[in-house]
Image (tube, rainbow, N blue to C red):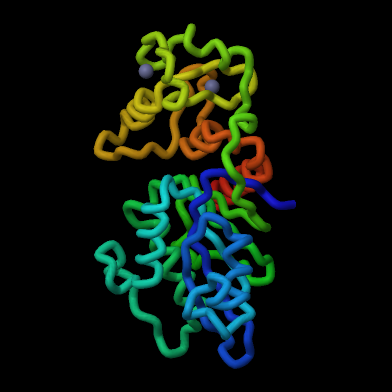
Amino acid sequence: MVVEVCSFFGVYLLYCTNPRYHGRIYIGFTVNPERRINQHNAGKRRGGAWKTSGRGPWDMVLIVHGFPSDVAALRFEWAWQHPHSSRRLTHVTRRTSRERQFDFHLRVLAHMLRAAPWCRLPLTIRWLKQEYSRDFPPGLEPPLHMPVAFGPVRAVKETKGAKPVSSEEQGVTLKCCSVCLKRFQDGDDDTLLHCFHPGCTMVAHITCLARLFLEKEPHQFLPIEGQCPGCKNLVLWGDLIRHHKGCYGDLEADPTSSQEHWANELQL
Ligand SMILES: [Zn+2]
Ligand SMILES: [Zn+2]
């Protein structure tokens, strides 16, 4: 099953399967992974990168997605490509002669996911090809709020129709923010977050909910999780944002893996 995600910004790892260049790695940014891998394998005349052209076929092995913007994803791409030039990654040791490029880039990724500012982003780490997947090195597992997912992903255009609209949400202008208790204004819709728990009608300004979730970490500006002021369930900020973007239903395959991820982590 292909998981569909809108507002897609991803950074991927390619693995070269051409015997002449076997084991080479390429890291890139994309808003459309399916199209991008086809471009790489079709060569530079068809939009592939110069470095990958003529050296294919390439496998798109892994993609990290959930970046809030293209700029955020491009910065991540740059740091992953140039770990020794990034002031965020001075603790990452250089590749040893025995370490394969693939292993090295996974080690860099593991460090990146645990380093500021990336450690606070609602990222998903997705293995696109099962045969390459492996555990992160012990002690270098991704933060608990980042699900590790498996299988293909598709970027889809945002459509109004994809947004789950309940009768309560339609009357949103008559309602009040669950945090600041101010009545919503026309045009507020895009700045509101809704709880996705069944039966919960909590709606709040994004800024109000972020402030609430960050009460215990006032030096941060991006929340990771918090308690819904309506139903009191613990909710992940990334899930609220995905729900806001109308993608939560499509990510239903993920919450299970996300929960499994949580369960696995908690058992350790
Ligand atoms: Zn508010
Ligand atoms: Zn709720």
Residue 90 sits above or below residue 101 on the image: above
Residue 161 sits above or below residue 86 on the image: above
Residue 166 sits above or below residue 153 on the image: above
Q: From the viewer's side, name the closer residue of 227 and 74.
A: 74
Residue 207 sits above or below residue 124 on the image: above
Quadrant holding ligand 1?
Answer: top left
Q: Residue furthest bottom?
A: 20
Question: Residue 92, located in which quarter of the rendered image?
Answer: bottom left
Horizontal arrangement in the rendering, residue 130 relative to residue 185 (left or right): right
Q: Residue furthest top?
A: 174
Residue pictured at 33% horizontal, 76% vertical: 93
Q: Position of residue 109 (x, y in %)?
A: 44, 65
Q: Is residue 125 visible?
A: yes
Question: Residue 221, located in which quarter of the rendered image?
Answer: top left
Q: Is residue 144 visible?
A: no
Residue pictured at 42% horizontal, 19% vertical: 187
Q: From the viewer's side, name the closer residue of 56 and 125.
A: 56
Q: Position of residue 115 (x, y in %)?
A: 35, 57
Q: Position of residue 90 (x, y in %)?
A: 27, 69
Residue pictured at 61% horizontal, 54% vertical: 149
